[in-house]
Structures are given as structure tokens and as C-alpha cells.
Amino acid sequence: GEREKEHGITVNAICPTAFPHVGEEEADAMSQHRSEWVERKKSMPQDIAEAVVYLASEAGRFVTCSALQIREVKRTM
């Protein structure tokens, strides 16, 4: 509210999500269809720590009332 804004207080949430596991059958199917292959990068504790540092830093001073979701990264090869 206004009182928090007046004192420079921001309120945010960091929401790490579950990361799906690629099973053996899915990996076999993906390797047979290289054009559809998706590389998955798993989240690490460092990813969450970096989000916390950002929100607590001067760079994150205008971010408030936000829920920052930490999700897996999917890249098509």
C-alpha cells in the first residue's frame, strides 16, 4: 500500500516450480526425431539465489507485487 511505498518497502514472491523429468522412453523418442529435440536445463539453487539478490538490489527497487517464477529453460536445437 501507500505506507510501504512511502518507506521504500517492496513485497515480492519467488516461486520455484517443479521441473519435469525426461524418462527413458521419452528420451528414445526424442533422439529419433532430432528436429523436435528439446534441451532441458534444470534449475539450480543458484538460480533462485540470483533472483533474491536481484529483488533485494538497487536494480529491483521498482519491482513490487510480483511473483517471479523460476522455471526450466527449453531450447529447440
Image (spheres, rainbow, N blue to C red):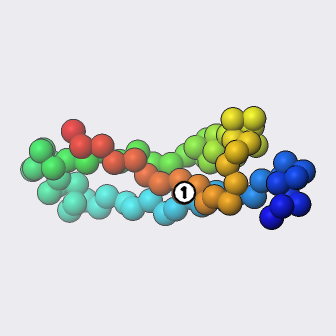
Q: How many marks?
A: 1
Q: Quadrant of the C terminus?
A: top left
Residue at x 59% of width, y 55% of height: 68
Give the side of residue 32 with respect to residue 77, left or right.
left
Determine which quarter of the picture holds residue 35.
top left
The residue furthest left is 32
Residue at x 22% of width, y 54% of height: 27
Nearest the eye: 60 or 47: 60
Q: Quadrant of the N terminus?
A: bottom right
Give the side of residue 23 with respect to residue 69, left or right.
left
Percent of width and height locating residue 66: 63, 58
Tag 1 residue: 69
Give, as a three-letter code, the residue at label 1.
Gln
Residue at x 9% of width, y 50% of height: 32
Does the image show residue 24? yes
Percent of width and height locating residue 42: 45, 48
The residue furthest top is 58
Does the image show residue 53? no
Percent of width and height locating residue 51: 63, 45
Residue at x 85% of width, y 48% of height: 8
Nearest the eye: 5 or 55: 5
Nearest the eye: 6 or 29: 6
Whether 19 is drawn above or below 53: the answer is: below
